[in-house]
Image (cartoon, helix red, strand yellow):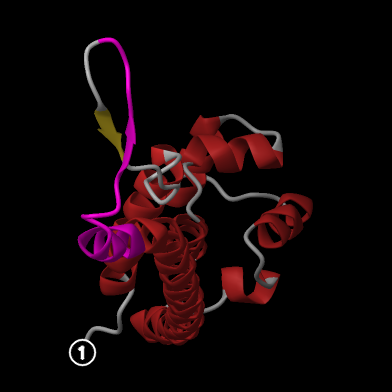
């Protein structure tokens, strides 16, 4: 029984014969002989084995570890994994909501910047139709030149382009972080 229990406990802990031998300060062949039932550890070594494998000496010497205990351990692991999955799902949902909110805020800010940059230009287009006949003329040696002086064009194109890109990316982010059913 000791040989079977030793092998089962060792594999349950995920130790190879070599790893267990290192922990017990013996050679791998000694572990192999114990598991094959060719030899038996002394009482001091049996206490060390039980400590390393986290079980009692009586359990090592007692009945063979059954599949029932394995099933119970698997159930316990499944319950723990289920709790971890729930926690990960809550964290993922929290991150999704956070990113969704940030994307909405970025879209609003980008739209505001776009309106701020484009409004004078649009206003100029509307006024230009009314002012078609109000042009100034200056003269030169080659004849009079008509000039319309106004300050309403796109002064700096970079903020407008960046705001447009930010708006597009924000809308994509809003779409990407939406709740899926």
Q: Farthest residue toward the right?
A: 44
Vertical order, 158 against 170 (above or below) = above
Q: Residue at x 71, y 34 (%)?
A: 25
- For the C terminus, the quadrant is bottom left
Taking the image as shown, residue 51 lies to the left or right of residue 65, namely right
Q: Residue at x 68, y 41 (%)?
A: 23
Taking the image as shown, residue 40 lies to the left or right of residue 107, namely right
Q: Camera-side residue: 73 or 136?
A: 136
Any part of residue 37 in sight: no
Q: Position of residue 20 (x, y in %)?
A: 58, 43
Q: Residue at x 35, y 80 (%)?
A: 67
Taking the image as shown, residue 109 lies to the left or right of residue 114, namely right
Q: Camera-side residue: 96 or 72?
A: 96
Query: Few, some or many C-alpha atoms within 10 Å of disc 1 (few <14, some 14-19, many ≥20)?
Result: few
Residue 61 colored magenta?
no
Q: Position of residue 161 (x, y in %)?
A: 35, 45
Vertical order, 154 against 61 (above or below) = above
Taking the image as shown, residue 20 lies to the left or right of residue 117, namely right
Q: Position of residue 133 (x, y in %)?
A: 22, 55
Q: Camera-side residue: 173 or 65?
A: 173
Q: Position of residue 105 (x, y in %)?
A: 49, 73
Q: Which residues are magenta?
A: 122-141
Q: Farthest residue toward the top?
A: 141
SS class of the residue under badge 1? loop
Residue labelled with disc 1: 181
Q: Camera-side residue: 80 or 151?
A: 151
Vertical order, 34 against 103 (above or below) = above
Residue 82: name its quadrant: bottom left
Any part of residue 94 in sight: yes
Q: Residue at x 41, y 86 (%)?
A: 75
């Amino acid at each position: 029984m000791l040989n079977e229990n030793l092998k089962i406990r060792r594999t349950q802990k995920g130790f190879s014969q070599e790893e267990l031998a290192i922990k017990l300060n013996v050679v791998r062949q000694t572990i192999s002989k114990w598991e094959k039932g060719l030899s038996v550890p002394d009482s001091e070594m049996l206490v060390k084995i039980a400590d390393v494998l986290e079980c009692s000496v009586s359990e090592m010497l007692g009945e063979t570890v059954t599949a029932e205990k394995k099933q119970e351990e698997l159930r316990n692991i499944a319950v723990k994994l289920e709790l971890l999955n729930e926690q990960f799902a809550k964290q993922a949902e929290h991150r999704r909501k956070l990113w969704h909110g940030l994307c909405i805020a970025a879209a609003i800010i980008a739209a505001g910047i776009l309106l701020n940059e484009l409004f004078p230009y649009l206003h100029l287009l509307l006024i230009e139709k009314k002012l078609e006949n109000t042009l100034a003329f200056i003269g030169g040696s080659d004849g009079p030149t008509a000039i319309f002086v106004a300050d309403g064009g796109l002064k700096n194109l970079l903020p407008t382009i960046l705001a447009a890109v930010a708006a597009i990316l924000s809308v994509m982010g809003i779409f990407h972080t939406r709740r899926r059913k």
